[in-house]
Amino acid sequence: MTRMDSFARLPEECISAILSLTSPMDTSRFSIISHAFKSATDSDNVWETFLPPDYQEIISTSVSPVVYATKKHLYFTLFHSPILLHGGNISFSLDRRNGKKCYMLGARELLLSWGGCWSWTSHPHSRFYEVAKLKCPGWIHIRGMIKTQMLSSNTAYAAYLVFSLAGRFNGLESSRTIVRFVDPQTENSMIKTVESSEKFESEATGKIARMRGDGWMEIEMGTFYNGQEDNREVEAWLIEINNPGGKSGLIVEGIEFRPV
């Protein structure tokens, strides 16, 4: 008898307890080992541990009902198909690797400088009802803010500007990006990631723009670590004051905060 055969002979409750200490992807792989493993890997008790502790509160604010048959079904639904929250201006999903929380602030949740230079329109590839389209190329300041309590604790995150630039990869190459913590109890701010000059290239070398799987482009704005007891807000800025003509056709979908 092999070690795996002995392991598979354990009571299903024991197998479930062991699987809950692994990762969602590992648990899915274990399902092919034996019938006992298959049953345990479908257990609600296992997949409950992979969902965020406040998942019920989160999905209760979805603009559309979140229908699921099992906790495993819910987990895979949330990483395959982001749900819209808070009136449809924020999306929520899970990181497929570890189940950590991912949020995207839609353009309506962002602070866009020179409001008269932006128009609001629908977009066939956007998860949101509206995106922001730049009408008057010039200086742009784009800021998004999220409460750290909304994010997974003890997790490293990055902020990404999600956008389209009329099919081009240039136009924001001289942009400055900043990510910083803001403590709501004080007036002090701590800059965690400061400026960077972004180059729009197709190769994944350094901080570059890249195509996403959903048809948009993204650029990393900076990184930060969300600790256990953080009760602050995180600001992510993109500032572009050069090459006004190069930003023609800029469409902003939002700013995404996801684990790195």
Image (cartoon, rainbow, N blue to C red):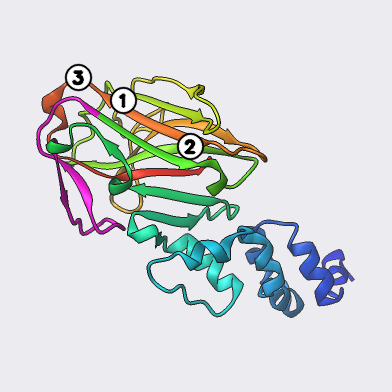
Residue 127: say if magenta: yes
Q: What x and y, as percent, mark residue 251?
A: 20, 43
Amino acid type for the residue under numbered disc 2: Ala
Closer to the N terminus: mark 3 or mark 1?
1
The answer to which of 56 and 162 lies nearer the viewer is 56
Q: Residue at x 64, y 37 (%)?
A: 227
Amino acid type for the residue under numbered disc 1: Lys
Q: Which mark is residue 199?
A: 1
Q: In this picture, is 31 found above or below 154?
A: below
Q: What x and y, as percent, mark residue 193?
A: 48, 24
For label 2, the residue is: 158
Q: Residue at x 43, y 74 (%)?
A: 65
Q: Quadrant of the N terminus?
A: bottom right
Closer to the N terminus: mark 2 or mark 1?
2
Closer to the N terminus: mark 2 or mark 3?
2
Measured Cα–Cα span from mark 2 to mark 1: 18 Å
- Secondary structure at numbered mark 1: loop
The answer to which of 223 and 7 lies nearer the viewer is 223
Question: Which numbered disc, 2 or 1, marks the residue closer to the eye?
Answer: 2
Residue 104: say if magenta: no
For label 3, the residue is: 242
Q: Residue at x 85, y 68 (%)?
A: 7
Boundaries of the magenta span: 117-140
Please rate how many residues cluster around mark 2, counting C-alpha atoms within 10 Å: few if below 14, some from 14 to 19, many from 20.
Answer: some
The answer to which of 51 and 191 lies nearer the viewer is 191
Measured Cα–Cα span from mark 3 to mark 1: 14 Å
